[in-house]
């Protein structure tokens, strides 16, 4: 039996949500919640709305650009941080 032969009735729909990580406003879920909390702390806690809005938009833009380039950059970065360093002085 050849690999390119199509057998009727043996198809299975593959949904896009099954292959991509869960996103929160276009960011990985943990990072989206963290960016939102940091922005709200600056705006509501420090009462510096102008700094909170600017820093929140900058953080969101940077993380959204990284997520558009590679959706799995955050788990890779977290795994990188867990690696031991061998050149400790």
Image (cartoon, helix red, strand yellow):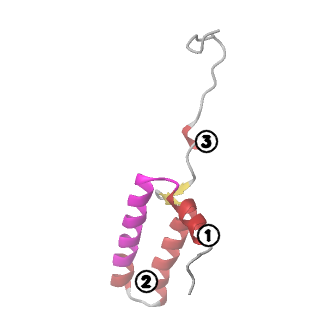
Instruction: Check disc 2: other Cα within 10 Å, few if <14, some if 14-19, many if 20+.
Output: some
Q: Which residue is mark 1?
A: 83
First to last magenta residue range: 54-72
Would residue 49 appear left or right of 41 to someone viewing this image?
left
Quarter that holds the N terminus: top right
Residue 8 to residue 86: above or below: above
Q: Residue at x 58, y 10 (%)?
A: 5
Q: Residue at x 58, y 71 (%)?
A: 81
Between disc 1 and disc 3, the foreground one is 1
Q: CA distance from mark 1 to mark 2?
A: 35 Å
Q: CA distance from mark 1 to mark 3?
A: 29 Å
SS state under label 2: helix
Q: Which residue is mark 2?
A: 43
Residue 81 to residue 3: above or below: below
Instruction: Check disc 1: other Cα within 10 Å, few if <14, some if 14-19, many if 20+.
Output: few
Q: CA distance from mark 3 to mark 2?
A: 36 Å
Of residue 72 and residue 58, the one placed in the foreground of this image is 72
Label pair 1/3, CB-CB below 8 angstroms: no
Q: Which residue is mark 3?
A: 18
Position of residue 74 measured from the top left corner of the image (x, y, whole percent): 53, 62
Residue that sits furthest to the bottom in the current view: 46
Q: Is residue 7 magenta?
A: no
- Mark 1 and mark 2 lie on one chain; the one further toward the N terminus is 2
């Amino acid at each position: 039996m050849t690999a390119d032969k199509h057998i009727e009735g043996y198809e299975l729909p593959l949904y896009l949500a099954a292959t991509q990580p869960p996103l929160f406003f276009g960011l990985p879920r943990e990072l989206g919640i963290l960016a939102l909390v940091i922005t709200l702390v600056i705006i509501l806690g420090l009462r510096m709305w102008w700094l909170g809005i600017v820093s929140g938009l900058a953080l969101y833009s940077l993380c959204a650009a990284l997520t558009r380039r590679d959706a799995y950059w955050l788990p890779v970065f977290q795994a990188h941080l867990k690696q031991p360093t061998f050149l400790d002085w």
